[in-house]
Image (spheres, rainbow, N blue to C red):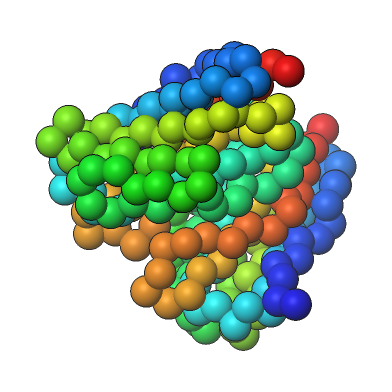
Amino acid sequence: QKEVEQNSGPLSVPEGAIASLNCTYSDRGSQSFFWYRQYSGKSPELIMSIYSNGDKEDGRFTAQLNKASQYVSLLIRDSQPSDSATYLCAVLWTGANNLFFGTGTRLTVIP
Amino acid sequence: DAEITQSPRHKITETGRQVTLACHQTWNHNNMFWYRQDLGHGLRLIHYSYGVHDTNKGEVSDGYSVSRSNTEDLPLTLESAASSQTSVYFCASSEQGANVLTFGAGSRLTVL
């Protein structure tokens, strides 16, 4: 059974710290990975996509992918209270055209 | 500006009633999706469409149907609502061949 697993949290970090969000997936052949942010009561919005092993940086966000370990992570540097949200990991399975989502990790940044 | 609109935003209905949730997008996207989001389950795919007259079942399609008569709209119908279908429903769209989803604001459905 194909799965996308995330720690549900909540993960609490102090303002200015690095928040590290992790995701593992079961399909070794998966090629495309996404991180969505969802504020409470709102819809998900894309913040990062990553397709190749290694790191991809966008401002304070860094996505890391390790296909051999079937692991993708999101680092948020200099965390701000406005980063408090649920972060959803999504994976495009091999041969599929649809994204499968993890259950999300709730992040709280404490001022 | 292009957008994706869901209606109604909130609905309360009774068990056994038919319910239709509307989704309208002006992005001119070929791909449209319906997800439901429940605590502990994350987003689960109900149905999806890659173009006019194309519809496909997702992982939790039982009790739901969709039809695609034009590019802009993908209504989701619950033929006979059940309490287990109480959830928040999100419509999403994407360009053909792309996997970046744009979501609507969501519709909260309560089945009593």
Q: Establish if A16 lies above or below B110.
A: above
- Residue at the location (75% across, 77% down)? B1
Residue A29: in sight, yes or no?
A: yes
When asked about the image quadrant of residue B22, the answer is bottom right
Q: Is residue B82 left or right of residue A22?
A: right
Front residue of A13 and B25: A13
Q: Is residue A28 left or right of residue B51?
A: left
The spot of residue B28 in percent (x, y) is 60, 82
The spot of residue A107 in percent (x, y) is 59, 24
Q: Establish if B41 lies above or below A51.
A: above
Front residue of B10 and A80: A80
Q: Quadrant of the C terminus of chain B?
A: top right
Q: Is residue A39 left or right of residue B69?
A: right
Can you name the residue that lies furthest to the left here? Answer: A68
Front residue of B58 and A24: A24
- Residue at the location (56% across, 67% down)? B93
Q: Establish if B63 lies above or below A75.
A: below
- Residue at the location (65% across, 52% down)? B90
The mark tally for this picture is 0
The spot of residue B76 in percent (x, y) is 65, 61
The spot of residue A58 in percent (x, y) is 46, 50
- Residue at the location (50% across, 33% down)? A76
Residue B54: in sight, yes or no?
A: no
